[in-house]
Image (cartoon, rainbow, N blue to C red):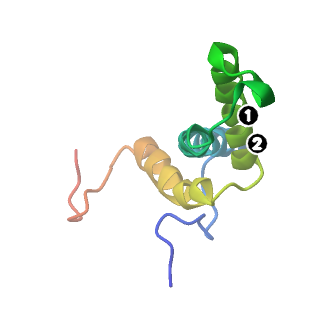
Amino acid sequence: MELRGATPTQPSNLDPAAMGRLRKQAEELEGVFLNTLTKQMFSSLKTDQASFGGGFGEETWRSMQSEQIANSMAQNGGLGIADQMMGDLVKMQEAAQNPYNMTSEGTSTR
């Protein structure tokens, strides 16, 4: 089984700085997804006044907590979404640098 968009095994002609930026962008996007996921998870938790105090302060704290958890998860491997996106991001970046881009039908766009 092949994962579409998995990290390419062929060397890329992109410089290491560009690869680092792509990796950071992929991790940030995975972080956004995980943030949404953790916010949903926390929204299902019912707390009472005695445990966390409730109210606006708790809502704000939970929002920040879910964001930090999501970012930490994404930076430490997450669900693998960033890894799967890297192959496609590299291909798109390489295609953007190629002056003679080819369409999927094999014809030149110039």
- The image position of residue 87, as x and y in percent, is 53, 59
Give the residue type that dot 2 points to. Ser
- Residue at the disc numbered 1: 68
Q: Which mark is residue 72?
A: 2
Q: Which mark is residue 30?
A: none
Query: Which one is in front, 20 or 73?
Result: 73
- The image position of residue 110, as x and y in percent, is 22, 44
Q: Residue at x 63, y 23 (%)?
A: 59
Q: Residue furthest bottom?
A: 1
Element marked by disc 1? helix
Rendered view: 57 above or below 37: above
- The reply to whether callout 2 and callout 1 are in contact (CB within 8 Å) is yes
Q: Where is residue 38, by image quadrant?
A: top right
Query: Which one is in front, 47 or 65?
Result: 47
Query: Which one is in front, 31 or 45?
Result: 45
Q: Residue at x 55, y 41 (%)?
A: 29
Q: Is residue 5 left or right of residue 31?
A: left
Rendered view: 86 above or below 32: below
Give the residue type that dot 1 points to. Gln
Q: Residue at x 71, y 23 (%)?
A: 61
Rendered view: 1 above or below 104: below
Element marked by disc 2? helix
Give the distance between the C-alpha atoms of the residues marked 2 and 1, in whole angstroms.
6 Å
Q: Residue at x 33, y 49 (%)?
A: 100
Q: Residues within 10 Å of mark 1 (few under 14, many from 20)?
A: some
Q: Residues within 10 Å of mark 2 (few under 14, many from 20)?
A: some
- The image position of residue 1, as x and y in percent, is 50, 85
